[in-house]
Amino acid sequence: MEYTPALYATAWAVLPPLVAIVLALITKEVYSSLFIGIITGAVLYAGADFGGILNHALNDGIIGALSDPGDVGILVFLVILGIIVALMNLSGGSKAFGKWALRRVRTRAAAQAATVLLGIIIFVDDYFNCLTVGSVMKPVTDEFKVSRAKLAYLIDATAAPVCIIAPISSWAAAVSGFVEGQNGISVFIHCIPYNFYALFTILMMFGLIFMRFEFSNMALYERNAVEKGDLFTVDDINAQAANAADEGSDKGIVLDLVLPVIVLVICCVIGMVYTGGIFDGESFVNAFANSDATYGLPLGAFVALIIIIIYFVCRRTITFTQCMSCVPEGFKQMVSPILVLTLAWSLNTMTGSLGLADFVAKLVENMGGAVMGLIPAVLFIIACLLAFASGTSWGTFGMMIPIGLAITQSQPQLTMPILAACMAGGVYGDHCSPISDTTIMASAGAACNHLSHVSTQLPYATTVAAVSALCYVIAGFTGGAFIPLIIGAVLMIGILAFLKKRESSFKISDAANNMNAADM
């Protein structure tokens, strides 16, 4: 008989991630915080059985995460990305692109806008987005004294929020897999106008950039960057090591960065549709919908790595021996994120074994007496809390979308708002939870202290989430997307205008915004 803990599907299931998050924010140290959260979950699962605690924490948790094919596939993908980034840096491609961009980017606002646009263009996968955009744009944003915390926010905000509204992405494939009995890609596309959190996040980024101000914790980091030239505010050994690794050859050209990125994008897309059966006669759309991102992405990245090494050796920018030296260097740069990801996945195992999903399902079932129009907003808030606590958007999709589909059986007019609310709540948690893999990757991509990224991003993400929740209330009663989109957009701009007037916000002067390389 399968063991079921006494505290299964109770409010205690929320405690392990809550302990990890609170400790991380208090101590500013993520490794021990995650590990204590894992131990907390194991104690709640096994009770006073010391052997059971160790077995659940290590065997089911950490070892289980490192033996899961999907998790290992993501880790392999990250290591290959790290190697490719190291190759681009060593060849001087990143440095050459930075110099090229500086001749065309004239202001801080333009540097940040270029980062956002590049993040939107690279919509295939959030992991790929985080590391690629960070590697490409760091030299440019550093030159214009954009703090690493702001860079990490721009990277993170163009990862999950963009992927969830991109039909050709690993996220579209994941979501379609949870929508049983319907055309998943079709449902995904129809939900895009209702994905208020993603759309308003993009609006907020451009609003902050062109209104030239920051608020809350981000204001301190940006003030230090502009006025003191301190891009970090909080020192981080891993960030400094990543900076040192960025120094490359002066012989590089822009093509040394652009070509590897293009090859990587093409190979990753081919790898994903390959796993979806495109070579067995499936259409491109169906192949993407049926793809396995945890296998397709590392497969595509591995092929891309071989092509990129051949390119650099043939161009004689770097030797084959130097290319091979990038293998351990790329792995070394990924050690910190890999460790955090492993612990975060293990923590997710703890919440799963304690029945967090079933606990959430009970909460939703008990809201039958509520006004039906409030259901999208309620599901959005629950998905936000669940994704923030568990650090997984795809896991949240798997828990919330089936619940949403069950509700739509009696409320078909609310199908799109309800499903979009489940997706948007998952994206919020993926965007800002300190134990989210994408949040971790954004910190790594920007070479920013992880908790600096979390503390500066959280107020921004929560502001957007609050506006989105209101829009889901409106959508629940109107059934359409147009009215809540208009109201939400006006409200977002109004909130930003109000915050800009507050003394605690940091207004970037025209002189600071317009500074260029010649001024430094």
Image (cartoon, helix red, strand yellow):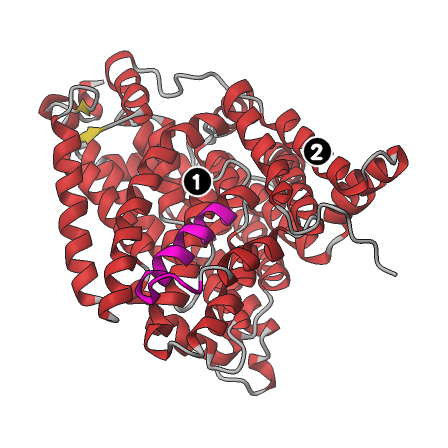
- Residue that badge 1 annotates: 432
* Helix, strand or loop status at disc 2: helix
Q: Position of residue 270 (x, y in %)?
A: 53, 69
The main secondary structure of the magenta stretch is: helix
Which image quadrant: the N terminus?
A: bottom right
Would residue 166 be seen by someone viewing this image from the given angle? no
- For the C terminus, which image quadrant? top left
Q: Amino acid at mark 1?
A: Cys
Q: Is residue 200 located in the magenta-colored stretch of the structure? A: no
**Residue 430: percent from the left, percent from the top?**
47, 47
Q: Residues within 10 Å of mark 2 (few under 14, many from 20)?
A: many
* Residue drawn at the location 66% of the way across and 25% of the way down: 32
Instruction: Kindly identify the residue that appears in the image at 57 percent across and 25 percent down.
Output: 23
Proximity of marks 2 and 1: CB atoms separated by less than 8 Å: no
Residue 40: image tag: 2
Q: Pick whichever, 260 or 507, lies toward us.
A: 507
Left or right of residue 109, residue 17 in this image: right
Q: Residue furthest top?
A: 228
Q: Which residues are magenta?
A: 368-387
- The three-letter amino acid code for the residue at tag 2 is Thr
Q: Nearer the viewer, mark 2 or mark 1?
A: 2
Quadrant location of residue 99?
A: top left
Could you tell me residue 10's position as x and y percent?
64, 47
Seen at 27% across and 23% down, the residue is 219
Q: Is 478 displayed left or right of 290 in the figure?
A: left
